[in-house]
Image (spheres, grey):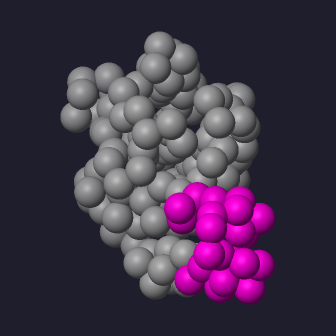
Amino acid sequence: MSRKEWKELRVVPGIAQVKALTLEACFELLRRVKSPSDILPVQMTGSEAVAAFFGPKLRHLTKEVFIVCFLNNQKQMIDFKQISSGGSRATVVEPAEVMRLSILHHAQSIIVLHNHPSGNIRASHADIQLTKRIQEAGTMLGVLLDDHIIIAGYDYVSMRSEGLV
């Protein structure tokens, strides 16, 4: 229910417009309360920390988004940026844009992540190929790819832990 907009909620018997708007507001408030503070720097020492920070922001989205997390040499997040938003099944990401932003942020390393609105936690062939392309570009430019995290609902997978980074 938390993914639905108020217009979709009001078709449920017993939920009128005011109740639907109230529910939508409650769901958004819950997402914000469960989300860690956006005050930087945040230590990103592993996939658990990344999932804890970004999970509440991404798990309820109905469109796929791609985020780059910029890290300093102590694995503290300098900043993060959503660089792409697509449909419910895919989004387009250019490795050149990932590297351009990484250089502008003076990142020593990056963690990339995206969500799977379908709830499927498995990395697709396209996800694996994109990860390899970003890793190769980063190697040439001196920006290490620490991990690629996929968030699907309340689950996540680290492509590093799967041996894909």
Q: Position of residue 123 (x, y in %)?
A: 41, 25
The residue lying at 66 percent from left, 44 percent from top is: 63
Among the 4 quarters of the image, the one containing residue 157? top left
Nearer-the-camera pick, 65 or 117:
117
Q: What's drawn in magenta, residue-wise?
A: 1-26
Nearer-the-camera pick, 105 or 50:
50
Nearer-the-camera pick, 91 or 17:
17
In the visual, does 85 lie left or right of 50?
Answer: right
Q: Position of residue 85 (x, y in %)?
A: 72, 43
> Looking at the picture, does residue 54 appear above or below residue 129?
below
The residue lying at 70 percent from left, 62 percent from top is: 11
Q: Position of residue 53 (x, y in %)?
A: 41, 66
Among the 4 quarters of the image, the one containing residue 17? bottom right
In the visual, does 6 lie left or right of 139?
Answer: right
The residue lying at 64 percent from left, 29 percent from top is: 90
> Looking at the picture, does residue 115 appear above or below residue 26?
above
Q: Is residue 5 magenta?
A: yes
Q: Position of residue 18 (x, y in %)?
A: 74, 85
